[in-house]
Amino acid sequence: MTNYASVGVDALVTLNFHRTRDSWLYFWKNRLFNKFLYLTYGTRDLLEKKCKNLHEKVKLWLDGEPVKLPELEAITILNIPSWGAGVQPWHMGTGGQLAQPQRYDDGLLEVIGLYSSFHVAQLQIGMSEPIRLGQAKEVKVKLLEKLPVQVDGEPWEQAPATLHFTLHGQIPVYKNKSD
């Protein structure tokens, strides 16, 4: 993982988009149509709720400590501030003021939860804030059943497994002084 990884509804929407893009039915290769497909799959999940009760299908540890998960449909691990078409979830809302700031050089990963695909849409227009699950040097996610996963936008269905996320070296990054 370079930027972000997730398990749950946002990975499912990405997986559905990816499968459509790879099919012979995919004719319109433009940004507007791609956004329409994401909207379609996100809306469809509001009805199907395929990732409902994700908190019962996964276990999460931050730096070796188990995390009691609230009812949610996705867990996202962030290594950069920007996610989901430019949203900066760690800094959103009042909880962003209470949380330790997100930094490129602190060796920490930020972990957030999402209630639904509608919650993702609310984040994208600034009408909500994420569920901040914590920051850690090591994140472990145990999948108790087959679930959609994505890493840096590359989705797949993962059989039960334990996923480990830790810092593995650093690469130089140029950034604006205002960041």
Image: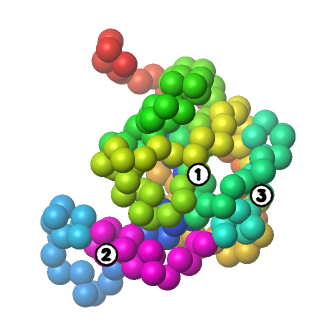
Task: Give the amino acid at mark 1.
Answer: Gly
**Residue 44, image x, y percentages:** 39, 79
At mark 2, the secondary structure is: helix
Cβ atoms under marks 2 and 1 closer than 8 Å: no
Which disc is residue 113 wearing? 1
Q: Earlier in the sequence, mark 2 or mark 1?
A: 2
Q: Quadrant of residue 144?
A: bottom right
Above/below status of 9 relative to 78: below
Q: Quadrant of residue 167?
A: top right
- Residue 51 belongs to the span the image colors magenta: yes
Task: Give the amino acid at mark 3.
Answer: Lys
- State how far apart marks 2 and 3 are (Cα): 29 Å
**Residue 84, image x, y percentages:** 38, 50
Q: Quadrant of residue 20?
A: bottom left
At mark 1, the secondary structure is: strand
Q: Residue at x 75, y 40 (%)?
A: 62
- State how far apart marks 2 and 1 are (Cα): 22 Å
- State how far apart marks 3 and 1 are (Cα): 13 Å
Residue denoted by label 3: 59
**Residue 179, image x, y percentages:** 37, 19
Residue extending farthest top = 177
Start and end of the magenta stretch?
37-52
- Residue 33 versus residue 24: which sits nearer the camera? 33
At mark 3, the secondary structure is: strand
